[in-house]
C-alpha cells in the first residue's frame, strides 16, 4: 500500500494552513492487514460504536484522537495526530457494477444495508451499539 497525500483546498489563517499545502495522508488497506489495524482501532474505542457511525449503504467509520493509543511510539518530530477508520463492506459479485465493459446493477436483495453492517460488527467483534 502506498500513502496518498491530501492537499488543502483553501487557505485558512486560523488553522495556519495554505492552499495546496499537504495536510493529510490516506491509505487503502485490504485483507488480513486491514483486519489487524481495525482490531487495534476498535480496541481503543472499546468495541463500542454509535448507530450514527453506520451508513445506509452498509459502511461504517469512526475516529480516534491519538495515534499513540494504537501502540505506535511517540515521536517528538511528528507530534500526536488522530486517525479516522472507514470500513467498506461488500458482498461477493459487487464488481459487476464497477467493471468497464457491460456494467450491471446490483439487485436490492444483494445490496448491504445498515442492519447487515451492524450485525456483521456485532458477530465478528462482539461489538456494542450505543
Image (cartoon, rainbow, N blue to C red):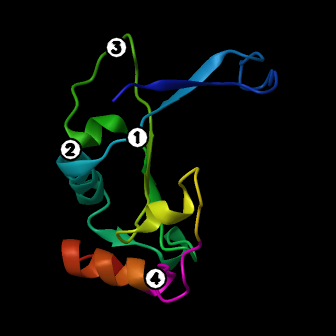
Q: CA distance from mark 1 to mark 2?
A: 11 Å
Give the mark nearer the N terminus: 1 vs 2: 1
Q: CA distance from mark 4 to mark 3?
A: 48 Å
Q: Position of residue 7 (x, y in %)?
A: 66, 23
Give the mark nearer the N terminus: 2 vs 4: 2
Q: Nearer the viewer, residue 75 or 89?
A: 89
Q: Which mark is residue 110?
A: 4
Tell me what residue is drawn at x 34 percent, y 69 percent: 92
Q: Position of residue 104 (x, y in %)?
A: 58, 69
The correct choice, above or below, for 116 with respect to 32 in the image is below
Q: CA distance from mark 3 to mark 1?
A: 26 Å
Element at badge 1?
A: loop
Q: CA distance from mark 3 to mark 2?
A: 27 Å
Element at badge 2?
A: helix
Check disc 2 and report the residue beneath it: 33
Q: In the picture, residue 17 is in which quadrant?
A: top right
Q: CA distance from mark 2 to mark 4?
A: 26 Å
Q: Position of residue 63 (x, y in %)?
A: 45, 52
Asked if the residue under mark 3 is in contact with the one under mark 4, i.e. CB atoms within 8 Å, the reply is no
- CA neighbours of label 3 inside 10 A, class few (<14), some (14 to 19), many (20+): few
Q: Magenta segment, which residues?
A: 105-115
Give the mark nearer the N terminus: 3 vs 1: 1
- As drawn, the residue found furthest toward the top would be 77
Q: Position of residue 71 (x, y in %)?
A: 19, 37
Element at badge 4?
A: loop
Asked if the residue under mark 4 is in contact with the one under mark 2, i.e. CB atoms within 8 Å, the reply is no
Is 86 on the left or on the right of 56, as rendered? left
Mark 3 vs mark 1: in front: 1
Element at badge 3?
A: loop
Check disc 1 and report the residue beneath it: 28
Check disc 3 and report the residue beneath it: 76
Q: Nearer the viewer, residue 113 or 129?
A: 113
Amino acid at each position: 500500500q502506498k500513502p496518498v497525500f491530501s492537499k488543502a483546498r483553501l487557505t485558512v489563517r486560523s488553522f495556519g494552513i495554505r492552499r495546496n499545502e499537504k495536510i493529510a495522508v490516506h491509505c487503502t488497506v485490504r485483507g488480513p492487514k486491514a483486519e489487524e489495524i481495525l482490531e487495534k482501532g476498535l480496541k481503543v474505542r472499546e468495541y463500542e460504536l454509535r448507530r450514527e457511525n453506520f451508513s445506509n449503504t452498509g459502511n461504517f467509520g469512526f475516529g480516534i484522537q491519538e495515534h499513540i493509543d494504537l501502540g505506535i511510539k511517540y515521536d517528538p518530530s511528528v507530534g500526536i495526530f488522530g486517525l479516522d477508520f472507514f470500513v467498506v463492506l461488500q458482498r461477493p459479485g459487487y464488481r459487476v457494477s464497477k467493471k468497464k465493459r457491460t456494467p450491471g446493477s446490483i439487485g436490492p436483495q444483494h445490496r448491504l444495508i445498515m442492519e447487515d453492517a451492524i450485525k456483521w460488527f456485532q458477530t465478528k467483534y462482539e461489538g456494542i451499539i450505543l
